[in-house]
Amino acid sequence: MTQIPVLELQRLSHVYVNDKGASLAVEGIDLAIARGEFISLVGPSGCGKTTILSLLAGLFPPTSGKVLLNGNQVNGPSEKVGYMLQQDYLFPWRTIRDNAAVGLEINGTRSKVTMKAVEEWLVELGLEGSSEKYPHELSGGMRQRVALARTLVTEPEVLLLDEPFSALDLHIKLQLEDLVVRTLQRLGKTAVLVTHDLAEAVAMSDRVIVLGRNPGHIRSEFIVPEEIRAVSPMTARKLSRFQSVFEELWAELDAVDEGGDSNE
Ligand code: ADP
Ligand code: MG
């Protein structure tokens, strides 16, 4: 029961400093994420979602407070943390196989064995027969699957997902939500998803964290009912309970935006 959280944010604050001065992006964030948990961060534009993910990824140090990974302070990027973004950042001149191997190359672990894993992931994620193709030959949804394969093949413990589905057509997005949840559950991975789609957050997560802004802070937290968690995102959306949780979350976000200047 008293397992160390995979990720922990302790009194985390971040100030961006640039030529226009200093701005407090997030303040006093406390959050513990358990192994295998799927968390979503939701909130208005500018409330610090991407900043929090960047701090979790160790891309830059927080101004104050700490990020702990398995109890150890994060001091930079780690192979244990994978990142997936809205844009797939595939290299147009590389084949799908070689794109999916980029993370391995960065980690210096590309080998016959890991390249076999690349092929297996491509098949697992429904990209059989695409290895020799180039990104322009694939649809947006397929390209995001390549990005997922590229992330998973490095075997991260934690996946950070910054709106990875938001540029996709609805039915492709729903399919990918199912695929991601199923895959991460099977592997027991921990995930932190940033999304502005509340239905997506409820359908995919164990817990939804609502952020407020000026400066970014945690406003409230929703535990998704077991009934919804027990089924796939696609099935979850059809439950009547889903609608009531969605509405509760919606009301909470509406409250965040009260008097705000949201443009999302
Ligand atoms: P979100 O992802 O929730 O939209 P961000 O984390 O991108 O929010 O941004 C949080 C706040 O920090 C915003 O006010 C934004 O303008 C500011 N910010 C983000 N990145 C930078 C940066 N590199 N330099 C200065 N300010 C930034
Ligand atoms: Mg963002």
Image: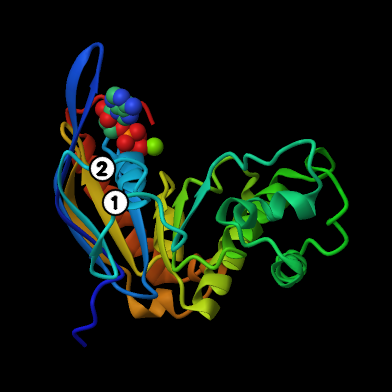
Left or right? Give the position of 87 relative to 135: left
Q: Which mark is residue 61?
A: 2
Question: Which residue is farthest bottom?
Answer: 1
> Foreground residue, 140 or 25?
25
Q: Which quadrant would the C terminus be assigned to in this image?
A: top left
- Which amino acid, by three-letter code, is at mark 2? Pro
Image quarter where ligand 2 lies: top left
Question: Does label 2 or label 1 sit earlier along the sequence?
Answer: 2
Q: Is residue 225 above or below residue 211?
A: below
Image spot of residue 160 (x, y percent): 43, 55
Left or right? Give the position of 243 relative to 87: left
- Which amino acid, by three-letter code, is at mark 1? Asn
Q: Which mark is residue 198?
A: none
Instruction: Please name the residue that numbered disc 1 is placed on.
Output: 75
> Foreground residue, 253 or 162?
162
Is residue 262 at all visible to an observer of this figure?
Answer: no
SS of the residue under disc 1: loop
> Foreground residue, 235 or 17?
17
SS of the residue under disc 2: loop
Is residue 17 at all visible to an observer of this figure?
Answer: yes
Q: Which quadrant would the N terminus be assigned to in this image?
A: bottom left
Q: Are marks 2 and 1 in contact (CB under 8 Å)?
A: yes
- Total numbered badges shown on the rendered structure: 2
